[in-house]
Every structure is written in structure tokens, then in C-alpha cells.
Image (cartoon, rainbow, N blue to C red):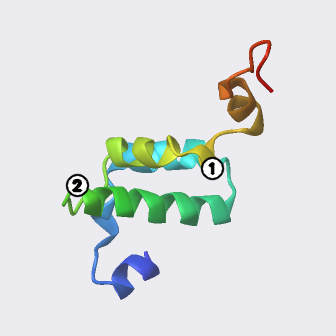
């Protein structure tokens, strides 16, 4: 709230549903919380919105650095024979 106030935004910048997604995603890690909030704010700014919605948080969570190591490994394309 203090950081939002410092840049002239109110405590209601994140809608309630967006806050719930943030809280579930960060699992109590304050650094992850701050980083996800910043990324969500950027996504909202790119959409020219003043309120961060679930869609903005989800947009931030879709970035590769928010995925687990296992999910990133599953996403990689396996080389076929003759390629390596």
C-alpha cells in the first residue's frame, strides 16, 4: 500500500479477484508477491488500465520465469533423430 501511495495510486488499484490470484500464486513469498504485483501493474499499464484485474495477473504468470522448472522442461521440444 505504501508503494502504491508513493506513486499516486490507491490501495484499490488491484481488484479483489486479482489479489486472490496473487496470494495463491506466491504462496507466502513476499519477494515473489512484490515481483508479481509489479509485473501485473506493467500488464495493466500496457492495456491502459488503472485497475489491475485477473487478466493482468494471469498475463504476468504466463511469462516463462513464473513457471516451475518442471513445467519449463515439459514445454521444451525434444529433438528428433538426426537433430542434436
Question: Viewer-proximal residue, 61 or 32?
Answer: 61
From this viewpoint, which residue is outermost toward the bottom?
A: 6
CB atoms at circles 2 and 1 under 8 Å apart? no
Residue in the picture at 38% in, 77% down: 4
Can you say whether 24 is above or below 30 in the image? above
Relative to 20, is 46 on the left or the right?
left
Residue in the picture at 67% in, 23% down: 77
The residue beneath circle 2 is 47
Q: Position of residue 71 (x, y in %)?
A: 69, 30
Question: Viewer-proximal residue, 81 or 25?
Answer: 81
Q: Position of residue 2 (x, y in %)?
A: 44, 81
Q: Quadrant of residue 32?
A: bottom right
Q: CA distance from mark 2 to mark 1?
A: 21 Å
Q: Position of residue 60 (x, y in %)?
A: 46, 49
Q: Earlier in the sequence, mark 2 or mark 1?
A: 2
Relative to 14, is 29 on the left or the right?
right
Numbered badge on residue 65: 1
Q: Residues within 10 Å of mark 1 (few under 14, many from 20)?
A: few
From this viewpoint, which residue is outermost toward the front?
A: 82
Amino acid at each position: 500500500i505504501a508503494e502504491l501511495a508513493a506513486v499516486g495510486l490507491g490501495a484499490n488499484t488491484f481488484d479483489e479477484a486479482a489479489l486472490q490470484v496473487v496470494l495463491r500464486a506466491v504462496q507466502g513469498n513476499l519477494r515473489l508477491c512484490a515481483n508479481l504485483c509489479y509485473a501485473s501493474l506493467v500488464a495493466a499499464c500496457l492495456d491502459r488500465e488503472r485497475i489491475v484485474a485477473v487478466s493482468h495477473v494471469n498475463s504476468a504468470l504466463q511469462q516463462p520465469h513464473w513457471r516451475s522448472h518442471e513445467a519449463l522442461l515439459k514445454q521444451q521440444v525434444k529433438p528428433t533423430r538426426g537433430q542434436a
